Image: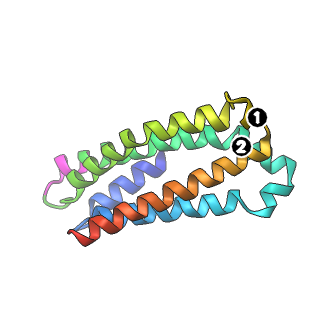
Amino acid sequence: MAIGAASGYHLASLKKLETFKLLNVTGLLYDLFGVLILSEVVATSEKIRSFVVNHLPRILISAHFFVPMRMAVFGMATFLFYRAAYLSGGILATFATIFTFAAFPLIFFVEDVVLYAKIRRFRDPLTRSRILGAFFIVVGIVVQLIAAIQDVFS
């Protein structure tokens, strides 16, 4: 939650915040997490795979909700209280709020398929870690494509 508050405060202070740049960084982070999860270290180590399958989805679900919401709250607060100095606060608050609610279907997917493995076919920890890694890569690519389209039309 501190990450969201600190980044919300810092990003709100930028003179010209462009959301496609935020989306691009977010997409790259997703891709990085996906590659790390799909690496051989995770595939061969039982202990790491257990963490990735049992604990990382909980962290992911919390981060998808609390980090953008803190960004939105701190971005809007800085915009309201220091309007002249923090012009990007309103843009950041809007972006973070939309990003939070757009992530809800993804959160349910991760919860049902990776965390609790409600489908019998996905009960194997190796399969679940591969699904989580693929999830990160696919979502990262989609977010980067959205950023590229937004950049082209801005």
Residue farthest to the top, as pictured: 118
Residue 117 image position (x, y, % from top left): 69, 32
Residue 141 in the magenta stretch? The answer is no
The kind of residue on which mark 2 rests is Arg
Which one is in front, 154 or 60? 154
At x 53%, y 38%, the residue is 62
- In the rendered structure, the answer to whether residue 68 lies left or right of residue 132 reads left
Q: Count how many numbered circles sit on residues in the image.
A: 2
Say few, some or many: other residues with alpha carbon within 10 Å of mark 2 (under 14 / 14 to 19 / 20 or more): many
Residue 2 image position (x, y, % from top left): 47, 47
Q: Which mark is residue 128?
A: 2
- In the rendered structure, the answer to whether residue 12 lies left or right of residue 80 reads right
Q: Which mark is residue 145?
A: none
Q: Mark 1 and mark 2 in contact (Cβ < 8 Å)?
A: yes
Residue 82 image position (x, y, % from top left): 18, 53
At x 17%, y 46%, the residue is 80
Span colored in magenta? 77-83
Q: Which mark is residue 123?
A: 1
Residue farthest to the front, as pictured: 121
Residue 82 in the magenta stretch? The answer is yes
At x 30%, y 66%, the residue is 149
Residue 50 vs 3, above or below: the answer is above
Give SS at disc 1.
loop
